[in-house]
Image (cartoon, helix red, strand yellow):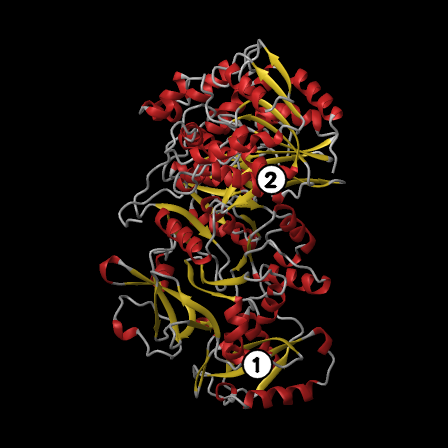
Amino acid sequence: MELGFSPVNFRREHYPFVGHFLDRNGIGLHYLDEGAGEAVVMVHGNPTWSFYYRRLVLGLRDQCRTIVPDHIGCGLSDKPDDAHYSFTLERRVADLDALITHAKLPEKITLVLHDWGGMIGITWAAQNPHRIARLVLLNTAAFHLPKTKKLPPSLWVCRNTPLDALLVRKTGLFVRLVARWGVRTRVLSPEERDAYLTPHAAKASRLAQLRFVQDIPLTPDHPTHALVTEVQGKLAQFQRTPTLICWGAKDWVFDDHFLAEWKRILPQAEIHRFADASHLVLEDKPDEILALVKQFFAKHPVKE
Amino acid sequence: MSATVTSNIASHLAVMEERQPDRPAVLFPARRDAQGVHYTQYTFRELDAVSSQMARGFERIGIKRGTRAALLVPPSLDFFALTFALFKLGAVPVLIDPGIGLGNFANCLAEAEPQAFIGISKAQAARVLLGWAPSVSVPVTVGTRWFWGGHTLAQVQKLGATEESFSSAIPTPDETAAILFTSGSTGPPKGVVYTHEIFTAQVEHIRALYGIQPGEVDLPTFPLFALFGPALGMTEVLPAMDFTRPADVNPLNLTAAIARFGVTNMFGSPAVINRLGRHGEAHGMKLPTLRRAISAGAPVPAKALARFAAMLPPGAQVFTPYGATECLPVASIGSDEILGETRAQTELGKGVCVGKPVPGLTVKIIRITDEPIAAWSDDLELPRGEIGEIAVQAPHATRSYFNRPAATAQAKIPAADGKYFHRMGDVGYLDERGRIWFCGRKSHRVETKTGTMFTIPCEAIFNTHPAVFRSALVGTPATDGDWKSPAREPVICIELEAEARGRDEGKLREELLALGAKFPHTQAIRTVLFHPAFPVDIRHNAKIFREKLAVWTKEQLG
């Protein structure tokens, strides 16, 4: 359904979009569907939402049809509890697939992926390889933790200790940390910061953040482990897919270990590493990345 | 739900705010230009926040728990926020259905004795100029304040603009939540007293009966129903229409809103169902997104039901809950059952089937009397199948009228354990499957020398004649000269279909009398009168004012 807009600060200034809702068994998945032309699907990670892609949408919608979901529990989507939603990779991929089907997109799709959105997007791509036109990867992964890399202490705390409830759910510390330290070349404006914090203002709304972190499979007995292993094994088929990687080097999770892994798996990728940018690389380098994406699209036109 | 714990009806909003904060709760058509209709909205988050802000502001200007506050604001974003603000405070909104006519407003306000008056500029002006509600000490103007005192809503919101969260009042089970004045079919409107418990039970009944899911989109064409939307987690899309005259609605405004927002539910009135159905039939239009329509206020004629049902996708139907402001719903039936089965019985004069009683509600058919009944006793009840007055007992049945002890005594029967039966003022019977068959208003029955005649079963026989648009049974004083006798002579008044006007009335009369002679319950009718246009209510264009017709009949018969 179409959604009219109301005067919430960040929306008017930074997010001038009319969103839509897709019904997923009574749970509403909010998404943007902006512009017309070749299809670009942007998949966000944790703890962000479609707001993260706003400038890419504004910059590309004159030439592309941009589809940007808010994962269930995030952004403007509904915030169900565990009884109504399973918060697993498998479910996320099914949601993405339902949205792509619902939107009746053309055969060839460019995926733009950030953070855990990479795992979701690449899993979908592995199931639909014929539909992938290009890949744009931003501080993300689609494989198990590189052997050279240890799980950062912050995530370890979230996953393995009772502090999870306190840090992620009660205080919203996780999203506050990301909003503060995920951008290094500037400080987010109060409205932008609000945009990241507001959708998660209620305690129940922060459930998705916690479940995302807990869905990272570190041991083989984790329910999501097998799926990640399977997808990882299929990544090599994208070695001929035009790929652009824009990387914030100051990311404390998706760091150079991950970048090296991408380089190894997809050697054809065009890589831009921003030494002073952090995890929210699109907040640090919006104009640079938009220009790179446009060049990259022009260099690799979509062939139906 | 436990019987001892009562939740504030506003707590439903908080639950939905948690679950789906960024979905629109209310969409309002603010303006129209070349690009079409532009809507403004409150999301669930905003509706919750704005209503808390208003509640805090109201507290500062002296509106508090228990304060009765007349709310004269048309359906709009403010209307929703104001109503939930008052619920949160534990103040008592006095809601007056605009369909009752201006003359009745003064009476309703005098009766409700509100301390606060929240209204648009026009309503405030009327209050001051017409001397409405002298009890008011706290006026709040929605819009511009002209020559009267008090605050504007904008000032109230400013007073309440803090970051603190607002905790809703936790009501006691008997605490009044709202006073509702709706158009009664007889006499001046009475204030129906709602408690939070009644509202909560009502929301649960509507949710369970119709399987309404959070996230659905509702188009309300009957303003009070719109308040259930946010509590059920539905988005309310307010249509561009005059809610006091649903029969005049432009069907294109409704169909456009239904298509644009993917409306799944429609709270309608019979007039709207009729209007949309005719439009659909004429233009071959469908409403593929609708899962159901719920029509209340008056029965929907089977013909209108069939036309509207034809616009719905497979599996969707029109439900007609039976009830009144004092108790809604009592029972419910879907168009599949009506069109597939009960309609044929209705046309044979068996009454209108309104379905099975809702779970938790007890129905008794009691012997007919116009007197108050001081206490329940089992011998009031009639054997199954006999026509009597419909009386109901349920957690969501209201217990009293505001400031109307006589009317309360007339309509309520005290029973054991502090429970009450509410007398519907309707007559009907229960069939072998426990379904209720409605046979008309009790006050419209006609007592003749040979027995009591009921409006719906009699009229149904004459309505089957193709030239008849509608008919009405009335009684006139018996013609045998005994004016003191309570017995009446039955007269059937006929309003013809437009295309049948001008036909030979003598011949039609013969045909109609022959039709009536076929059925035992209409054999006694010997008089047929043709009326150019029945006096009916403006809202539903369906409730026939039989009292007025009876006067006309008397004049005709000289």
- Relative height, residue B488 to residue A135 (above, below): below
Q: Nearer the viewer, residue A143 or A248?
A: A143
Label 2: chain letter: A
Q: Is residue B126 visible?
A: no
Same chain for the residues under marks 1 and 2 in the image: no
Q: Nearer the viewer, residue B390 or A67?
A: A67
Q: Indicate which disc residue B468 carries.
A: none
Circle 1 residues within 10 Å: few <14, some 14–19, many ≥20: many
Amino acid on which the number 1 mark rests in the picture: Ile
Residue sitting at 35 percent across and 49 percent down? B197
Numbered disc 1: secondary structure: strand
What residue did someone put label 1 on? B492
Is B369 placed left or right of B250 in the picture? left
Give residue A248's position: percent from left, percent from top: 57, 15
Give residue B141's position: percent from left, percent from top: 54, 35
Amino acid on which the number 2 mark rests in the picture: Asn
Q: Indicate which disc residue A128 carries.
A: 2
Q: Nearer the viewer, residue B120 or A161?
A: A161
Q: How many marks?
A: 2
Numbered disc 2: secondary structure: loop
Label 1: chain letter: B
Is A119 placed left or right of B91 in the picture? right
